[in-house]
Image (cartoon, rainbow, N blue to C red):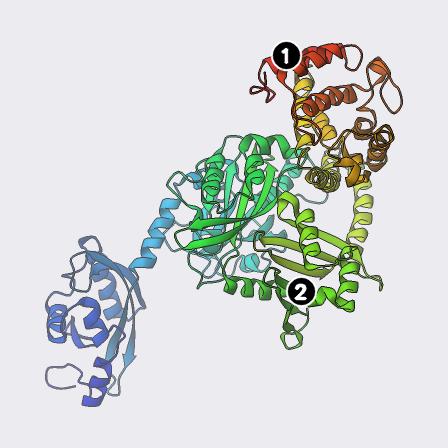
Amino acid sequence: MNNDGAFHFSKEHKEAYEMLPTPLGIYQLIDCKVVTLLVSDGLCDLIGKERSLLMDHFNTDMFGNVHPDDAEMLARLGYRFATKRDSYDITYRTRLYGRNEYRYVHAVGQFRQMDDDTFLAFLEYTDITDSEQQLIHTLQEFDSPKARFFDENMGAMVVVSSEKKQLLYFNKAVCRMLSPKVNYDSGMTFQQYFYSSLPDAMNGLFDRVDMGPKVITEPYTHRDLEVNTISSTWNDEPAYVVYFYERLASSQVVNQDNALRHKRMAFNSLIFSGSKNELAYYQNGYKGYRVWNLTRNEMILNEGNAFIDGDENTGKTFDHYMNTLYRMSATKENDYFFNICTKDQLILRYESRAYPQNQTIPIQTKAGRIFISLEITLMKSPDTGEIYIKVSEENVTDERVVDTLMMQTIKNQYDYIAYLDLLANKTRIVFGTSTPENRKNTAVKPVDYIKSASGARQLEIYFRHTFSSLDDLVAYIDDRCGGESSFFQVCELPNGRFKKIFIQVIDRSNQIYYLQCSDITDILQTERKREKELKEANYKVQMANKDLHEAVRAEHEKVESILLQTILSVNNALDARDEYTCRHSERVSEYSAEVARRLGWTAKKVANLYNIALVHDIGKIGIPDALLLKPAALTESEYEQLKKHVEIGSVILKDFTAIDKVSEGALYHHERYDGSGYTRGLSGEAIPIEARIIGVADAVDAMNSTRPYRERQSKRYIIDELNNGRGTQFDPLLVDIMLEMINDGLLDLSDLL
């Protein structure tokens, strides 16, 4: 301290402070005026002025560069800080770097007592313009289409950042439930907005992320709430989505509202949750997801991969999104996938669950050729009954991504993870589910492995198939993957353990695959125990309330749908055996469904008939290729052998209850109206109506298809054959309907007169 009353640093201390790259200012209050004692190099760079000019500026016009709307607030809080030595933590707008535009500055200050008992104020400044603009963007999100959707359709929910728990979004329903006591301000945490007066309340809210519902006590009202916290993203920022539900006391009778609550919980968790990008170095991220209301063909959420955003319209409708992917597709191997991935096709296939769920697509981007793995989920809204579709995207191109994914999935207790590049004859494998020290990362040549006795034996155990060569393995994988580009298989080892093998096609043309192996013995045992518990609980619930019967039936339908997908996969494999009959069953299904609609059947019966027709020829899986693919007319004995496919199909499907009368469709679709068909010789209406419809649709598609021993027949020929078969081979009424369909142009006969 000298005569002017200001504190003076030693030469060494002054130079040390002034050389700091951190923006720092040191001030002293003298005679009710703030005096600038020292500014650092970092603060000079931040403000954009030399040291002497900056100190003069602070001492003569402290707030000259501050935004006029913030100057009064800054002066008021600064005076309180200087006189009462309160904490100083403020954000305001000012000019920086010698430019005219305003930027956001965060200033934090504290007083320090010096050796002579003088108190000096030390203030550090940070340019937070970028993060503040992000907060402004967050506020704008509250009026975005997706926010309005959540307000109108979701129950009580909030979205918070994973790291700081700042509120990124909250809807009106949660404000009605939790009743915040303060006005919302940008950057507030969940705790500050909803429980500012109770700092220790709701502390356990984020302790059970992705672990299912948890019951907590609401501090203000002391009522029990059921809370479900799940990992997600919000504008590609890692976030938690928290759903709140009024908890139903165990003494209350379960009602329809409670059942709806659980359906909403499942719907929200499945459709509106996503994985965060954990690979910060990977350009544009590698994971994302998008959600559409498929019924209305409207986009709800776009957290997708930036590589696919081809233009401003991408994703506005689901069909436009798929068209963008198709245009970017680097090969035509996925044409079948794109043909069935349309809004109308997916809605039609929803009930049977016969829609594609996984696909890896090579696309050409400005960054080069990359591979996008798609996971498709369809689900019906419990509130409106409308169908929603979620497409999760993952970039699996970069080798660093593959390495990281392999190490991440190992944490999920897989036995091993493999990255197979069969064309290059190399495989990278990560073994082990224990500690990192015990894990092995090795390279294997697939050709040598298949030729070795131990390798051949292990492959036979896992796949129930003997591979004679690498080409045999490739053919097996491609055949099992089919149009889905992935498959899994469960096998029982000699020691009684059960293993699950999952294979995903990354690049079909270059024979690159991703494989996971896991032990599911304990899971199966747990599931069996759970099934037993569910049966016991189901009996009690049914006695208490009939509404819960729907939930049990939904679980049953889920199991049945998995079995249906298995049957359809076998049928697709059957179609793939013969290029001449490829998609035959699908066309027969479409024709049959249209006939049923014209007969006035209900939508449910039409869908059931569609599924019967899809597997009507499944018995051909038991017919040898030499006979099935013969490029000439069959002999009488060969024809007798071929006719056995109806009985084979009936046996395969006899215990399958997911599709009503499916076994009859396979057994009777070659019976004739006059009784001269096979194999039972039924006639007239003794033949089930489903089989009669499939029979006429099957005949029309056969005539309309090119076969090894003849060309596709003309439209005139098909019409004549239908008329000739009226009352003999075909039901007369169905002949009339089929002729109407041909006249209406519903069958692809336009180029054959």
Name the residue carrying label 1: 740
Residue at 36% from the left image edge and 45% from the top image edge: 140
Q: Which mark, residue 504?
A: none
Q: Is residue 171 left or right of residue 336?
A: left
Q: Which mark, residue 446?
A: 2
Q: Is residue 430 left or right of residue 655?
A: left
Of residue 592 and residue 431, the one placed in the foreground of this image is 592
Q: Residues within 10 Å of mark 1 (few under 14, many from 20)?
A: some
SS type, badge 2: helix
Q: Residues within 10 Å of mark 2 (few under 14, many from 20)?
A: many
Residue occupying the far right of the picture: 680
Q: How many numbered marks, from 0 up?
A: 2
Query: Which quadrant: the C terminus?
Result: top right
Of residue 293 and residue 34, the one placed in the foreground of this image is 293
- Return the x and y of residue 161 as percentages of the image width and height: 46, 56
Select label 2 or label 1 by which is in front: 2
Amino acid under disc 1: Glu
Residue 190 visible? The answer is: no
Q: Quadrant of residue 695?
A: top right
Q: Using the image, determine if residue 668 lies above or below residue 145.
A: above
SS type, badge 1: helix
Residue at 78% from the left image edge and 68% from the top image edge: 454
- Return the x and y of residue 277 as percentages of the image width and height: 49, 58
Residue 540 visible? The answer is: yes
Of residue 528 and residue 188, the one placed in the foreground of this image is 528
